[in-house]
Structure formats: C-alpha cells, structure tokens
Image: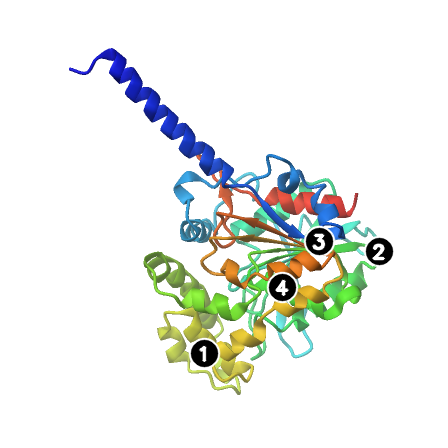
Amino acid sequence: MVSLEKKLGYAAAAGATVYYGVSKYVENSRVEIVADQSGEGQRLISQCASLSSPHARLVPTPYLCSGMLQTVYCTSQALKQDAGSRVEYVRESKEMEDGGTVSLDWYPEQPARDDEPRVIAVVVPGLGGSAYEYHVRSVARRLAEGKQRMHVVVSNHRGSGRTPLTSGRLYNAYDTSDLRDVLAHIHERYPQAALVAVGFSLGANLLTRYLGELGDRALVRAAVAVSCPFDTEIAGRALSAPGLLNDHLFQPNLMATVKRVVTRNLDVIRASPINYDVDAIMRATRMSEIDDLVTARAYGHKDCWAYYRAASSVEFVDRIRKPFLAINARDDPVTPVQGVPQERFARNPATALALVRHGGHIGFFTGVVRPRIWYLDPVAEYFDAVFA
C-alpha cells in the first residue's frame, strides 16, 4: 500500500512536470520580429503591444498545436458566425477593361461621395477565398470598430464569392492588374481617404508584388500580409506533398471550392479560346493539377512549376517603400518558413516580419474553449501606429 507521503510526492512531481511543460509551451510561443532595428518598420512594431511587449506571444489552442491542425481548423470555420464576425456587406460590382468582373463588398456600408471616410481598408482574400470567410469577416469587423473606424472593402477575385465569370480571363498569384485597378477606382472616388490593405495567402502575395512594383507610388498608406507564400515554388511543392490531413481534409476542401466556381461558370469556361479540359479539371485532386490545367495554360507557362517560379514575390520585398508588416507561422504547411525571405526584411527599413512558432496557414488560433484569431490585434495595432 502506497503511503500518503509517497502519494503526495507523486502528486508534487506530476504537478511540477505539468507546470514545466506548460511554461515551456508558453515560453516557446513568443513572437519573433525581423526588421531593420533603426527603420520605420521597427518603430511601428514598437507601438504594437501584441508584437513588442515582454508578454507578446501566440499561445496556440492546445488541441491545435500543429500547423496542419491550425490550417484545417481554419478551413472548417469558414462559415462560422459569432459576435466578432457578423457583418452585412453592401456589394458593388466593378467591370474591368477586358469585360471581367470583380465584386467589392463594403462594410459597414459603401460611403457616399460627399461623405468621404478618413481611412479605407482594402482586404484581398486568398485562393478561392472571399468576403464571406470567417477570418475575412473578423478582420472587417475589427477594423470597422477599431480606433480608426475604417470603412472596409473586400475585393473578391474573379469567380470568387459568387462573383460571376464574365470573361475568359481568371486570376493568379502574380498578376496585380486587378488589384491596381481596384485601388485606383477607390482612390478616384475617395481621393482624400487614406488607403490601407490586408492580404491573405495568394492575396498577400499579390499585395507584396504590388507594393514592390510601385514603390513610393503605391496608393496604400500601409499594408499587412498574412501567411504570404513569398517563394511560391516552395509553397507549391509543400501544397502538393502527401499527408493524411492534406490528402483527406485540406486538399478536398480546396478542390471543392475550385470546382464550384467551374460548375457555376461552365458556359464562360467552355467558350474560352484557351480550350480548357473541363473533364480533367473536375477529376483533379491536387491544386498543382488545377494550376497545370488552368493557370499555366491561361498565362502561357509550360506547367504549374514554371507558373509558381514566375509568381514569387521574394525579390519585391526589397522594393517596398510603404510601411509593410508580414505575419507568418514557422509551422505553416502551405507556405513554409523556408520561403520567407527573412534577410530582406532585416535590411528594408519600411518592412517588418512577425514570426510565430505555431499558427499554420491563416489559422493563428489561441484560447481553449472558444479559439479566437490572434492576429486581429497585431493588424489593428499596426494600422493604429501608422496613423498615430
């Protein structure tokens, strides 16, 4: 029979072990900042408590402790509704020069021309994403209710967010012409409003390239990129890698989104001069197959790998001249940290990179009972610092 003294000793040892494990878990969750220490990027970060305070960390939800779990959970929450994500958009359809259509979803409303807002935040979703995803709605609500009381507009890509395809031209990870036109359209209508932008995944890649392409001439005052792939070839290979959750949860969900767009727009796709193989598209099980059959063919690349190499935004980081914050996770299974050009952030004074150990792709969930999106605070605080 074990004595009371021994039982207390075992309990103390178990408690000490749990305490040590939890403390290490929390300690390893600190936010790592990569920036030119004397630059504007670092100065802005120093005003963001969630990124620069001694307690700045992302402690991931315990049961979402891997990058793939965070990523799959994020995907599964796309339609979630809660107090911080309930929005009602006002939609504006914008016809592009080639006859294509981009949908602009405004929140809390589309401002009248004679009631020009002070700040407008433009949100650029990722591949297959739209204004209706949980993380996009959460960002829109947070920025609209934050210190700057921003008007938010989500720029839905061609064919996304129930935007009809009205031309044979689609969108990709490097063609910034639609983003340029949307920003110019908003700036022309509200010339006194300051523009900021938030991009997710593919949308973050487009935003990074746009800022690098235009430098000082970029129409946005500042921007935040969440889960930007930067090196899209590395991201493409990661996205194609076999794995239990990738094969049975993430890829099937992504494929279902793409195929819904194809199904809704079959007439336009079949009428395209590019002669897409619709049957092969509907049989595809990997995003690389879709990019082979659709994106590479539409934009004149040999295959998906040539397209991924062309889409990289790595070299554009050096050319960014407006305040720019990138938020990435070291365990992102879709856009691996190996593709994030940390050395370029360290030498460009306009930029800053926030790296966390756990967060997955666009996930970044923290909390236990009700997981919440961690980066909502950094995004809002960063823009508050820009306008301070």
> How far, Cα to Cα, is label 2 from label 3?
31 Å
Residue type pointed to by label 4: Ser
Q: Earlier in the sequence, mark 1 or mark 3?
A: 3
Work out whether 72 lies above or below 307: above
Q: Residues within 10 Å of mark 1 (few under 14, many from 20)?
A: some
Q: Are marks 2 and 3 in contact (CB under 8 Å)?
A: no
Residue at label 2?
Answer: 192
Residue at label 1?
Answer: 292
Residue type pointed to by label 2: Gln
Work out whether 363 lies above or below 126: above
Residue type pointed to by label 1: Asp
Residue at label 3?
Answer: 36
Q: Which residue occupies the foreground of this view, 255 or 331?
A: 331
For the point 46% across and 83% down, the residue is 276
The local secondary structure at tag 1 comes to helix
Q: Earlier in the sequence, mark 1 or mark 2?
A: 2
Q: Residues within 10 Å of mark 3 (few under 14, many from 20)?
A: many
